[in-house]
Image: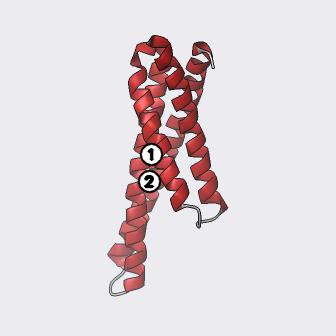
Amino acid sequence: MSVESSKSVLKIVGIICIVLGVMGILGAIVLLGGGGLAVAVSGGDEELAAGGAIALAGGVVALLASIVRILEGFFSVKAAKDSSKIMPAWIFAVIGVVSHVISLLANLQSGFSGILNSITGLAFSALVFIAANTIKKSME
């Protein structure tokens, strides 16, 4: 992959990551709100409270993952414009690859949509890593 094509990949995938991260934050807000509401109205219903607690935990994880995805996208777009700023994009790509591999392993029993989401995220992070690594090596 050439440096110019790497910059194009960083820009395109970075924008996609930002959009997906914003959508993930919106989903996390829904999970947090729904989980909080379930816990608040559960009264003495332990099952409802437990479900609400699980939704709250899922919302926190989704929020953190979405923030990482937005940062990965932001630094990728920034590095596409200025190659000297490649290290943050490279670091967040590594974080993204590791977190998506963990997510994939955790989602192996969750069904097709969970696995597909993890594979898609892993592919985006791997693309950013390969492109960032190409630019990083060209600067050495």
Q: Looking at numbered disc 2 in the image, what kind of residue is underneath it?
A: Ala
Q: Secondary structure at mark 1?
A: helix
For residue 5, side relative to residue 128 (left or right):
right
Q: Secondary structure at mark 2?
A: helix
Q: Which residue is mark 2?
A: 62
Residue 42 lies, in percent from the top left, at: 36, 80
The answer to whether 93 is drawn above or below residue 25 in the figure is: above
Q: Quadrant of residue 49?
A: bottom left
Q: Is residue 82 visible?
A: no
Is disc 2 in contact with disc 1, using a CB cutoff of under 8 Å?
Answer: yes
Residue 84 lies, in percent from the top left, at: 41, 14
The answer to whether 38 is drawn above or below residue 32 in the figure is: below
Q: Which residue is mark 1?
A: 66
Q: Nearer the viewer, residue 50 or 37?
A: 50
Residue 35 lies, in percent from the top left, at: 40, 67
Query: What's the colour scheme?
Result: secondary structure
